Image (cartoon, grey):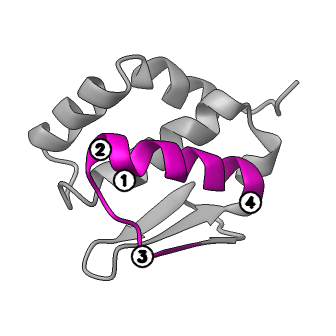
Amino acid sequence: LREVAGDLLAHWAPVMHVQVREWHIKRMKTRWGTCNYSAHRIWLNLALAERPLECVEYVVVHELCHLLEASHSERFWKLMTKFLPDWPERRARLNQKEKAE
């Protein structure tokens, strides 16, 4: 997960014109990821290691969008659609109970 997430962050941050100062992986019970807007810090859930790459990419882009828009406002979801048009399908797959193939 560290390698995959690192590659995704390295790809998406410049595309989205955002800067991530630090990012980490930890076990979380209720979230796939979190973003601290003021610190430009992202945390990713260790459980993403069991999910398909497209789902990990969804979470990475989602958290990076929070560096542009802190809340889940209409603007946030427009940004998600701009950068990852198929985000609803990816989110649905992420939240399915079965693990990655």
Q: For label 3, count other residues whose C-alpha is less than 10 Å away and answer few (under 14), some (14-19) or many (20+).
A: few
Secondary structure of the residue carrying tag 1 is helix
Of labels 4 and 3, earlier in sequence is 4
**CB contact under 8 Å: marks 4 and 3:** no
User: Which residue does the image show at 27% across and 60% down from the upper left?
Assistant: 67
Query: In the rendered structure, which segment of residues is drawn in magenta?
Result: 1-23
The outermost residue toward the bottom is 39
- Residue 12 in the image, given as x and y percentages of width and height: 43, 43
**CA neighbours of label 1 inside 10 A, class few (<14), some (14 to 19), many (20+):** many
User: What residue is pinned by disc 2?
Assistant: 16
Above or below 37: residue 9: above
Residue matched to label 3: 21
Residue 2 tag number:
4
Upstream in sequence: badge 2 or badge 3: 2
Q: CA distance from mark 1 to mark 3?
A: 12 Å
Find numbered disc 3 in the image and state the secondary structure of the residue it sits on: loop
- Name the residue rendered at 38%, 26% in the picture: 84
Q: Is residue 70 left or right of residue 101?
A: left
Real-space CA distance between mark 2 and mark 3, rounded to the nearest whole angstrom: 15 Å
- Residue carrying label 1: 64
Q: Quadrant of the C terminus?
A: top right
* Mark identifier at residue 15: none
User: Can I make out residue 70 in this image?
Assistant: yes
Give the mark nearest the N terminus, 2 or 4: 4
Where is residue 58? Give x, y as percent.
50, 36
Between residues 86 and 83, which one lies in front from this camera angle?
Answer: 83
Tag 2: amino acid: Met
CB contact under 8 Å: marks 2 and 1: yes
Helix, strand or loop at mark 2: helix
Q: CA distance from mark 4 to mark 1?
A: 16 Å
